[in-house]
Image (tube, helix red, strand yellow):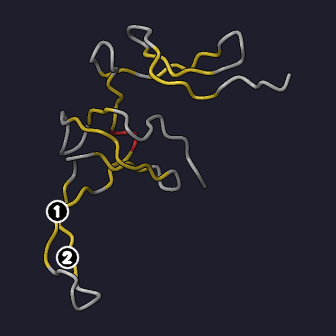
Amino acid sequence: MTSKIHVKKEDKVIVISGKEAGSTGKVLKTDTSTGRVYVEGVNMIKKHLKARKQNDPTGIVDREGSIDASNLMLVCPKCGKPTRVAHVVNADGSKNRVCKKCGAVISNIKKADKGE
């Protein structure tokens, strides 16, 4: 079952709860099947790598672990504050994501159909 996630790749977010609360970063990847998000520099884990070929390196690598999407809040690019996202349908049928605090357009979700 897929779930809707309120953040997208390349969005700037802030962590609002958990051990990483208060840290910010850019969304690297989203997983809609589990509702989890990978954020740059947040929830760092150690990954033990084993060489698959003779030339491949082995060792312990730091990388981002996933965090639940409900623990994240979008940071508005205009006002710089953590905000919820509103969805506004324009007169031409296109849909935008809008900041609830300042009203700035964050991104365009759906473009208007040209066929009609």
SS at badge 1: strand
Q: Which residue is mark 2?
A: 48
Q: Quadrant of residue 90?
A: top right
Q: Earlier in the sequence, mark 2 or mark 1?
A: 2
Image spot of residue 23 (x, y percent): 18, 36
Residue at 43%, 16% (x, y): give it: 99
The answer to whether 46 is drawn above or below residue 81 in the figure is below
The answer to whether 95 is drawn above or below residue 66 in the figure is above
Q: Are marks 2 and 1 in contact (CB under 8 Å)?
A: no
Residue at 21%, 86% (x, y): give it: 55
For this orientation, the residue located farthest to the left is 59
Q: Considering depth in this image, is 71 or 112 the residue closer to the camera?
A: 112
Residue at 34%, 30% (x, y): give it: 73
Residue neighbourhood size for the residue with mark 1, other residues' Cα within 10 Å, grouped as few (<14), some (14–19), many (≥20) = few
Residue at 70%, 9% (x, y): give it: 91
Q: Considering depth in this image, is 34 or 10 the residue closer to the camera?
A: 10
Q: Quadrant of the N terminus?
A: bottom right
Q: Which residue is mark 1?
A: 62
Residue type of the residue flagged with mark 2: His
Residue type of the residue flagged with mark 1: Asp
